[in-house]
Structure formats: C-alpha cells, structure tokens
Amino acid sequence: MAQQEQHKARWRLIGPGIVVAATGVGSGDLVASLVAGERFGYTLLWAVVIGCIVKIALAEAVGRWHLASGQTVFDGWRGMGLWTFVFFGPYIVLWGFVYGATAMSATALPLQALFPAVPLWVFAVLAGLSGLAFVWFNRYPALERVMTVLIGVLFVTVVGLAIYLLPDLGSMAAGVVPTTPPDSLFYTLGLIGGVGGTITMAAYGFWVNAKGWRDAGWIRMMRLDNRVAYITTGVFVIAMLIVGAELLSSAQVALSEGDEGLVQLADVLQERFGTFLSVVFLVGFFAAAFSSLLGVWHGVSLMFADFVGKIQGHTERSVEERESSWAFRAYVLWLTFPSMLLLLFDRPITLVIAYGVLGSAFMPFLAFTLMWLLNTRRTPAAWRSGVISNIGLTIAGGLFLVLCANEIYGRLTGA
C-alpha cells in the first residue's frame, strides 16, 4: 500500500513535462502532421514516433545536465568557450523578434475565425499583451496550472476529434513500419524534427529547476516527467495525422501548410459535421497556440535572463530571482512590442533568411554540445551519458544537421 501511495505521489509531481508539452505542440506541429496525413495517409506515422523518441533523448539530456551538475546549460556552454555565447546571443535576440509575431498571429487566427468582425491584428495584439501581463505578474506555479488546463482542452478537442473520425487501425499499424513515399524525404525529416519544440527544449531544464528539482536526487522523477511530456506530444500529433488521413485524404481536400490550414480545417468540419464541431476544434487550436505563446514568453525569457546573468558574472541565482530580473522582463517586452511591427509589415527577406538559418542550426548545436558536456568530467561520473543516451543524441544531432543544411540551401537558393 505504501509503495502504491508513493507511486501516486510521483505522478502528482509531474509538471515541467506538461509545460514543455503544451509549449512544444504549437499550431505548426499540428499543421505539419495534418498535411502529412492528408498527403500520405498513415505512411509517415513511424516518423512521428521517432520524433518523440529523439525529443525524449534531447530533453532528458537537458534535464540531467541541470540536475546532475547543479548548473544551467549556459554554465556548460561557457566552459566550452566564448563561441557558444557568440552563437547564442544573436540567435535568441533574432528568434524572439520573429517568433513573437508568429506566436501572436497563430493565437489570433482561431479567434478571428470565431469572431470575423474583429480584425486579425487586434486579436494578435491582445494575445501578446495577455502573455506579457501573465508572466510579468505570475511565477512558474501559476504557469503550470494554466498550462495543465490548456493541454486538457487540447486533449479533449484534438484527440476527441480523432476518435470521432474512427481511424483505420489496420492502416495505422502498417504506418509504424518505416517507409518513405516518393518526394517525401525532407518532409519526413521535418516531421521528425518538428515534434514538440525547438529552443523550448533547452528551456525544459529551467522549468525543472523552477519546479524545485535542484539536484541529482530528482533525475528519476525528471525522466518520468519527460517521458509523459513527449508521449503526450506524440498523441496530439498522431491525432492530427488521423484527422488528415481520415477527413482530408479521403475527401481529397488540400490545405495550405501555414497556420491558415487549421482555419481551413475548421471550415471543412463545419461543412461536413456542422458548426458545433468546428467551434470546438477552433477552441482547441486556440489552446495549442496560446499555450505555446505563454510557454515561450516565460521559458525563453528565463533563458535570456540566465544568459545575461552569466555574462555579468552572476553564477548563482535562483529561478525566482531570474523571474523578477530586469533581463527577464526586458526579453518579455522584446517578444511583445517590437514583434508587433511585423504584424503590420511583410517580414524583410534578409531577416527571414537569417532567422531560418540560425533557427535550423540551434538544434544540432544543442544536441552536440550536450553530448560533449554529458560525456566529460563536467558531469559527475554516475550521471554521464550511457550508450542509449549517446545513440539518441547522435541521431538527433545528425538529423538536425541534415535539416539545417537543407534549410540553408533552401533559403539561399529560394528552392
């Protein structure tokens, strides 16, 4: 009985995984898996599964470094040389500028579809200001509670819709076997790489610390939390794959690959099943987009505050101190107000190219630097990476390196 109670207590401690899952499953992941289902049916289901495994390995490595070393990822990077900070500094500034506009627009789309009389930019501005106000006046425990509600809404709407459409279980089982349809290679790699976040992967270690997990004694709990996070992420992405395969592929309906594709899906649902189901889906779309916005406004701002603190020589600061620091609040403001300018104007092509190149380079950078940190004396011997972790990080780094090269080629050639 005591062991059973202890097991239940561990499950009640799960939290950072909920936050990273809610942040990582944005509208982009939902659209990618939806379009994959529409174009290829269940053929690429295996890619979603591998994507989850890759992200489990990456997030586990981030969390293990924070807990085993007692340091943040920036402490580790600083020990590897100045080049890491030279790479990350411009990246986080540029990423925040472009992503802020993307997150606000994605959150505004379902609201504008529900209330078409209101201009899109109004909802986008309100979304950004809501995120700003929330993280300015609240701390991590409040974020975790809100994210739990939002991911619950997403589960009911998206997974509920997939169940309602009665998936073909035989085709799903066949989709677990790796195959690549013609002209699907880089699309497949992108689907693997896109399951559940980019820079938010690195934010996981900060949320682990914010939960109160500060040393190696919490590694076992962190691993359970991390597995729950990316299994949950996989369930959402598979649900959208089912929707694409069962609803769109059979009806030969093609959607755009941007966030507008989810609004188009709502129109398809309304035409086939009526207004109620369409509205329910748009509510789920909003939950996915707004949870990503809140997670980035908090988690990446924490990362920026720690980055600035390390430059200033502040080596020992609690998460609570970072949450109220000037650097944290400055980055939240950076995510919100300058990004609003991009809502009014087309994004300059040079900015888009730089954003794409830096963004695609971050994931191999994260994977390979973690491999270095977790296989050297910087990590206590008991918690250094074993064979499974090293294989996972190698696959992740290699995969994202290929995606990075493809992204750079595409940006430079316009392909």
Image: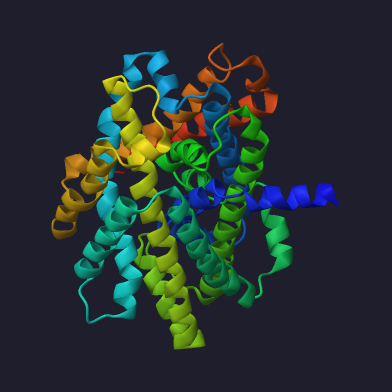
Front-most of residues 280 and 250: 280
Q: Nearer the viewer, residue 104 or 331?
A: 331
Farthest residue, direction top: 377
Which corner quadrant holds the C terminus?
top left
Q: Identify the residue at image location x=32%, y=56%.
A: 103
| Image colouring | rainbow
Instruction: Name above or below for residue 216 compared with residue 121.
Output: above
Q: Residue at x 47, y 45 (%)?
A: 190
Vertical placement of 369 versus 299: above or below?
Answer: above
Location of residue 17 with respect to 374 vertically, above or below:
below
Residue 407, visible in the rendered structure: no
**In this orientation, does residue 127 appear?**
yes
In front of the other: 384 or 282 = 384
Query: Which x, y percent locates residue 69?
Result: 54, 22
Q: Residue farthest to the right? A: 1
Q: Where does residue 357 sit, x and y in percent of width and height?
A: 31, 35
Q: Residue at x 48, y 64 (%)?
A: 150
At x 35% / y 60%, what residue is drawn? 258
